[in-house]
Amino acid sequence: MVFSIFNKKKDEIARIEFHNGGVNVLESTEDGFKSLVEKILAKEEFYSLQEDYDGAQGRFLMRRVQIVPGAKDFPRVFKEFLEGVGYVVIENRSEIEEKIQRYLNDIPNEDADKKRLMRELPVMNYLEKTALLKKLEEVS
């Protein structure tokens, strides 16, 4: 799983990958981002809220559960942590972006909407990308 990391100005500053229980900084344009990730992983504890059903009381309870690197939920929790400290984090879905790109290739390069979409595509979240893909499929 690969995430693109953007600053508040929506400039891409890094790409990270979750692989074999770890976090790899694939590339970074911001000095110190890799060391920041290493410090966060070394010092921080990560938590997530989990809903459990208590049969004795007949109700659902929310529990705070510690998530360790390598856990199934760790990419989501780490993403939320980075968002909490001010970064914009987008999961890369290359298969969707490739389909969108194929549709956009049929539109002339001078088209203002195409230029706007090409500029905004990297920072669109999954929902925005799938909605755009569906619209492009409908129009074609």
Image (cartoon, rainbow, N blue to C red):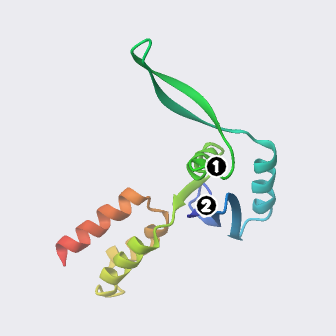
The foreground one among 73 and 42 is: 73
Residue type pointed to by label 2: Ile
Residue 25 locus on image (x, y percent): 71, 66
In the rendered view, tell whether residue 126 sits above or below residue 76: below
Disc 2: which residue: 5
**Residue found at x 71% / y 70%:** 29
Residue 118 marker: none
The residue most toward the front is: 56
Residue 47 locus on image (x, y percent): 64, 36
Q: Classify residue 60 by image quadrant.
A: top left
- Sooner in the amino-acid sequence: mark 2 or mark 1: 2
Residue 67 locus on image (x, y percent): 64, 41
> Within 10 angstroms of label 1, few (less than 14), some, or many (20 or more) residues?
some
Q: Distance between the residues labelled 2 and 1?
A: 9 Å
**Residue found at x 61% / y 42%:** 84
The foreground one among 4 and 116 is: 4
Residue type pointed to by label 1: Leu
Disc 1: which residue: 82
**Residue found at x 64% / y 49%:** 82
> Within 10 angstroms of label 2, few (less than 14), some, or many (20 or more) residues?
many
Badge 2 vs badge 1, beta-carbon distance below 8 Å: yes
SS class of the residue under badge 1? helix
Residue 1 locus on image (x, y percent): 56, 64
**Residue found at x 46% / y 68%:** 93
The foreground one among 61 and 58 is: 58
The answer to whether 139 appears left or right of 19 in the picture is: left
In the rendered view, tell whether residue 118 sits above or below residue 56: below
